[in-house]
Amino acid sequence: MTRTPLTVRVVKVIRETADAHSFVLEPDSGAAERFRYRSGQFLTLRVPSDRAGGSVARCYSLCSSPDRDPHLKVTVKRTAGGYASNWICDHVTEGDVLEVLRPAGTFTPRSLDEDLLLCAAGSGITPVLSILTSCLHSGTGSVTLLYANRDEQSVIFRDELAALAREYGGRLTVVHWLESVQGRPTPAGLRALVRPYADRPAFVCGPGPFMDLATEALPRLGVPPDRVTVERFTSLATDPFSATDPIAATDSIAATDPEPEAEAAGPAGTVEVQLDGGTRTLAWPRNRKLLDVLLAAGLDAPYSCREGNCSACACVVVDGEAVMERNEVLDAADLADGLLLACQALPVSDRLRVTYDA
């Protein structure tokens, strides 16, 4: 079955810089619950295209804070040769309706009360701003932001960051690195700036070279790798808006007849799923990915790439064991916390419990 995507209406367009626009979004009436999100998560947007299927999908971080902002907001920066980002900046206007998937992602702090080190470059500021604002508004810790850009004119959210610094006084420190003044970021320069904050959990987002630089510098200062969280986006190779669920199933275990290929892989197990405050128990055939089972049973499970690349479908294993065919996004710390990519997960245990509500 093909799933009906969610839609949002664009209520405001903000020109942040010459090449970056923010889009303030309002969900359909009655759909607000499906747009609940955590600071640092992202939205997947459908962008019209001449490609087969008529669209491409791209993930854009939410820069809004669920603790402070009444609407969702994403910021899109033009990239050279970037079809989707340029199309959005050129064509999306106030009043337009966009197709999206549920907010998702694991670039989120465990606590809003910890002192944090945030490292961003360019449009990598978008999820970082969400985290920063929520920590200041609803948490008790202090936040230090290292923010790298080409020049002063390319600093996204410059005025907003200055206003937050005034509002929250000593709890927020913003350190700007401008290439026009200091040259390109260097390992030694980065280490010198973040050394006073190396005892904090760190979040890193930005262009690949900047993230490589930061993730090399932080461990050398003694920051354990499991305390460094990185957000990396890759263009989706498939279009989740045109994907169909590969199987049709029912959540009635007794009524589920095993297919011959499932019998060959072993008898189906069961999985208890907590999602959006509810609990369902489903048959989980040994050769079926968890996400496919959930979608076929009619559950509104989050997902995006279905390729093991984006973490949109991540859930937490509470009990039991599963394996992933592919994992390009969860690190050792995530796996130790029980995170699992549902789009790549196959059961090992006969019975499992997973939750999306952790």
Image (spheres, helix red, strand yellow):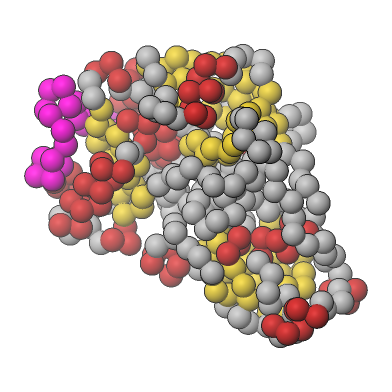
Q: Nearer the viewer, residue 263 or 319?
A: 263
222 lies above or below 145: below
Count of numbered marks: 0
Determine the residue positioned at 47% across, 63% down. 327
Is residue 229 found inside the magenta-colored segment of the image? no
- Where does the image place residue 202, in percent across and percent down from the top left? 30, 49
User: Vertical placement of 265 versus 213: above or below?
Assistant: below
Q: Nearer the viewer, residue 178 or 36?
A: 178
Span shown in magenta: 169-190
Q: Residue at point 54% right, 47% down?
A: 237
Farthest residue to the right: give it.
255
Q: Relative to 220, does residue 348 appear above or below in the rendering?
A: below
* 152 versus 290 height, above or below: above
Q: Is 176 included in the stretch rendered in magenta?
A: yes
Residue 218 position within the rendered picture, expressed as x and y whole percent measured from the top left: 21, 52
Residues 96 and 245: in front is 245
Query: In this orientation, which residue lies closer to the viewer: 142 or 116?
Result: 116
Q: In the rendering, at what x and y percent does residue 120 appear?
A: 31, 37
* Observer able to see residue 279: no
